[in-house]
């Protein structure tokens, strides 16, 4: 997984890995670092960037979370439909295609070295292995983090359609193979055969030209179909202790309860409220955020920056160095002009705001109320009531310098650090669940949260992939898969 990235980014990478595994007909297993100071940078958080559950009965004195898995597996469970019951293969003798050398796989470190070697030198090849005990043959693609995106773009996406053109000149044979492939991986993910046929009839492979294969994947709704299939398979699913802790956490928030405490957490629709995600924090220093802030203030009559570098200091000529909350609010009101909101009998509409900048957002609300009156926060004759995560101290980015007492590799108390880190991860997962279940979601397309929400809010309805209401406040209005 990528270093020092947040919960949504890591879940997006996992979702892409699940997509790749499903569509290339391979098992997915997670390679996690052992509890070793030299190999696991997260050892002081109990061996995972997500920390240790606070009520974990298996805590060891060293804070290693006892028998709980490390890495992403601390919170995510790979379902059998993806893993096919496989574990990380060990005790292998492997070769890289077109290379003369062989190597042994006995440990996490061996796989880590091979992953880096094959990615950097040979361009994502599968390694061919023989199990030293059973003599079983297997092919393994060892890849993760941001490399997944490039593998998808370079190796998988172009071939999803193109290979069927390459394999047959017969229209009938091409269509038959395409439909068989769609049926095979889709039904393994829980899509019904009727839903598969509904898609292939509407978006048949012979509806496009041969050289349009990459465009087809994006523009002809195959990505919508892919992420609806992930939703059907309840990707991502979570470990039971995470589900339990999220359910307990949700009891502190005055929102309609989820229909069931599924291990997927996110795959229950229709919350009877709306939600916004206001991402600031370290993202304010990035180029797209800086340019979008400049664009917003120019629309308010301010001049353009004379210095066009991606330096946040160049925004000092504006009242704020971020896009204000009012921009999100205006988009939300405009989207609801037709007053097609739920709970029509109520005079109040709840609006949950997930943010890593709670104090500033609350100040913005107070200032706008002071200037415009309480009636400003009205949509469709309903008074909007803002809601926030009750654990404000844990709503920072998962790796936003972590905390003063744990900024160094060996500093701080391991158990305390691990529990604090888990609290941050849990706050993020609660936010994601609330955002996923909301009736209307308002975000921005530069955020992995907004991109992940596209996946979490896309499901099959009446046989078609359908995305529930998403509004982009700024940064573009195009839907993007979580890995783009």
Image (tube, rainbow, N blue to C red):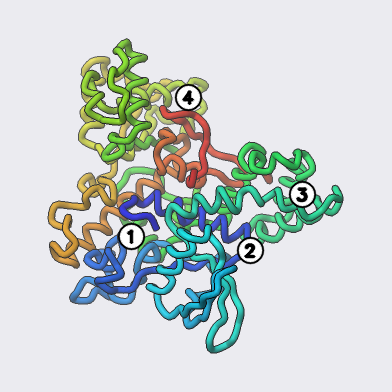
Q: Nearer the viewer, mark 2 or mark 4?
A: 2
Of mark 3 and mark 4, the one earlier in the sequence is: 3
Label 4: few (<14), some or many (≥20) within 10 Å? some
Q: Which residue is mark 1?
A: 245
Q: Nearer the viewer, mark 3 or mark 2?
A: 3
- Tell me the CA gap for discs 3 and 4: 45 Å
Q: Give the side of residue 370 with respect to residue 128, left or right.
A: left
Rendering coords of residue 446 (x, y %)? 41, 36
> In the rendered view, would you say 17 is above or below 362?
below
Q: Nearer the viewer, mark 1 or mark 2?
A: 2
Q: Nearer the viewer, mark 1 or mark 3?
A: 3
Q: Which residue is mark 3?
A: 165
Task: Residue at 43%, 80% (x, y): give it.
Answer: 106
Q: Quadrant of residue 135?
A: bottom right
- Tell me the CA gap for discs 3 and 2: 19 Å
Q: Which residue is mark 4?
A: 336
Of mark 1 and mark 3, the one earlier in the sequence is: 3
Of mark 1 and mark 2, the one earlier in the sequence is: 2
Q: Give the side of residue 467 with respect to residue 330, left or right.
A: right
Q: Which residue is mark 2?
A: 25
Of mark 3 and mark 2, the one earlier in the sequence is: 2
Task: Residue at 45%, 69% (x, y): give it.
Answer: 114
Tag 1's secondary structure?
Answer: helix
Tag 2's secondary structure?
Answer: loop
């Amino acid at each position: 997984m990528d270093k020092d990235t947040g919960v949504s980014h890591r879940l997006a990478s996992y979702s892409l890995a699940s997509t790749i595994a499903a569509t290339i007909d391979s098992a997915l297993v997670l390679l996690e670092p052992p509890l070793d100071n030299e190999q696991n940078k997260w050892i002081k958080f109990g061996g995972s960037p997500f920390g240790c559950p606070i009520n974990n009965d298996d805590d060891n004195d060293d804070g290693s979370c006892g028998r709980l898995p490390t890495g992403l597996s601390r919170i995510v469970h790979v379902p059998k439909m993806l893993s096919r019951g496989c574990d990380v293969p060990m005790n292998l003798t492997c070769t890289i295609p077109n290379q003369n050398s062989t190597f042994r796989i006995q440990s996490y470190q061996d796989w880590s070295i091979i992953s880096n070697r094959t990615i950097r030198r040979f361009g994502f090849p599968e390694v061919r292995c023989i199990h030293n005990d059973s003599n079983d043959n297997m092919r393994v693609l060892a890849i993760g983090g941001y490399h997944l995106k490039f593998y998808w773009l370079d190796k998988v996406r172009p071939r999803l359609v193109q290979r069927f053109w390459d394999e047959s000149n017969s229209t009938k044979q091409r269509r038959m193979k395409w439909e068989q492939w769609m049926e095979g991986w889709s039904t393994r993910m829980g899509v019904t055969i009727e839903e598969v046929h509904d898609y292939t009839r509407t978006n048949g492979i012979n509806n496009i030209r041969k050289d349009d294969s990459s465009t087809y994947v994006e523009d002809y709704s195959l990505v919508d179909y892919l992420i609806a299939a992930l939703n059907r398979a309840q990707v991502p699913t979570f470990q039971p202790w995470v589900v339990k802790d999220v359910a307990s956490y949700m009891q502190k928030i005055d929102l309609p309860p989820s229909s069931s405490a599924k291990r997927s957490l996110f795959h229950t629709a229709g919350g009877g409220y709306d939600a916004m995600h206001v991402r600031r924090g370290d993202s304010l220093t990035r180029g797209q955020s800086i340019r979008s802030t400049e664009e917003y203030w120019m629309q308010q009559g301010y001049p353009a920056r004379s210095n066009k570098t991606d330096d946040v200091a160049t925004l000092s000529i504006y009242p704020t160095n971020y896009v204000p909350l009012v921009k999100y609010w205006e988009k939300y009101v405009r989207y609801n002009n037709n007053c097609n909101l739920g709970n029509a009998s109520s005079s109040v509409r709840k609006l949950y705001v997930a943010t890593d900048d709670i104090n500033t957002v609350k100040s913005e609300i107070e200032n706008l109320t002071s200037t415009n009156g309480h009636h400003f926060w009205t949509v469709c004759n309903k008074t909007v009531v803002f809601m926030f995560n009750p654990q404000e101290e844990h709503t920072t980015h998962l790796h936003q310098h972590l905390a003063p007492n744990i900024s160094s590799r060996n500093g701080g108390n391991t158990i305390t650090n691990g529990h604090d880190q888990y609290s941050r991860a849990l706050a993020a997962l609660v936010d994601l669940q609330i955002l996923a279940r909301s009736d209307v979601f308002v975000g921005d397309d530069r955020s992995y949260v907004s991109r992940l929400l596209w996946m979490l809010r896309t499901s099959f309805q009446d046989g078609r992939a359908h995305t529930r209401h998403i509004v982009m406040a700024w940064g573009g209005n195009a839907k993007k898969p979580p890995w783009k």
